[in-house]
Image: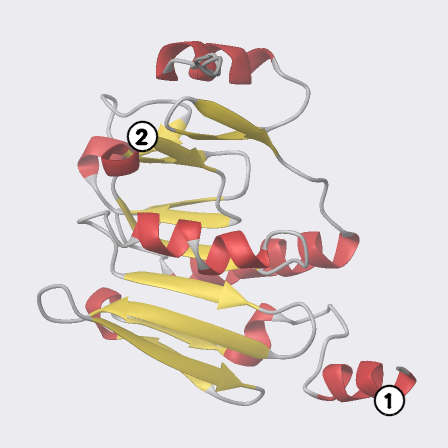
Amino acid sequence: MLAAKKPVLSEADYLLGERLAATRHEYLDGAARAMDGESKLHNKIAFQSRLLVHTALQGRPCDAYMENVKTRVAATKAYYYPDVVVTCDPRDTGPEGDDYFIEHPSLIIEVLSPTTESIDRGEKLAAYKMLPSLHAYLLVSQQSCHVELYRRGEGKLWLYQDFGEGETVEIPGLNLVFSVDGFYAGTGVTSASAALELGRG
């Protein structure tokens, strides 16, 4: 007996439905995945990350968006909602760009959550690397002052670095410099947070 095929959701139907849906969904090659709600802390760090990026981009022809704007990965027929996405490409920033998603991002930031960390580190990392315009992918911890950077090197090479409290994140390809502490300003998260939580366990 042949197994029943799962119904496939077209990109056009997904995009139309997403404009009307009360819950956000990400999309991967014919299937939609509902997104979990985020914690207050996640929201604070995401907002602070967007503020940090917005300030650094002053005077440049770039736009920075938060989690309600999708990023399209054509190679995998996917749409994701990054916590922060930056584009400097006229095809996104100009009048011809789509109103609901970005196709040529230069920087993507995800704030790690227990329920989505494996996807951010696995599926999304692999998909984002397929974006020719992408220079860097930042993962920001909620547990302590810890930021991980994946940045494009020569050819297909991607470089990895991690940074802690008091350190500086440099992204040469974008000429951007961020203080790790800046991602956590006003959130109460410090490098001692993780040690404190372990002590309670």
| Badge 2 element | loop
> Where 201 falls versus 92 (above or below)?
below
Which residue is denoted by mark 2 in the rendering? Answer: 77
Disc assigned to residue 199: 1
> Where 22 falls versus 56 (above or below)?
above
Q: How crowded is the residue under tag 2: few (<14 C-alpha within 10 Å), some, or many (20+)?
A: some
Q: Residue at x 60, y 69 (%)?
A: 141
- In the rendered view, how is the structure colored? secondary structure
Q: Position of residue 49 (x, y in %)?
A: 54, 60
Q: Residue at x 52, y 43 (%)?
A: 66
Q: How crowded is the residue under tag 1: few (<14 C-alpha within 10 Å), some, or many (20+)?
A: few
Q: Position of residue 27 (x, y in %)?
A: 45, 29
Quadrant where the C terminus is found in the figure: bottom right
Q: CA distance from mark 1 to mark 2?
A: 44 Å
Q: Are the residues tagged 1 and 2 within 8 Å (C-beta)? A: no
Q: Tell me which numbered mark, 1 or 2, is placed earlier along the sequence.
A: 2
Disc assigned to residue 155: none
Nearer to the camera, 151 or 5: 5
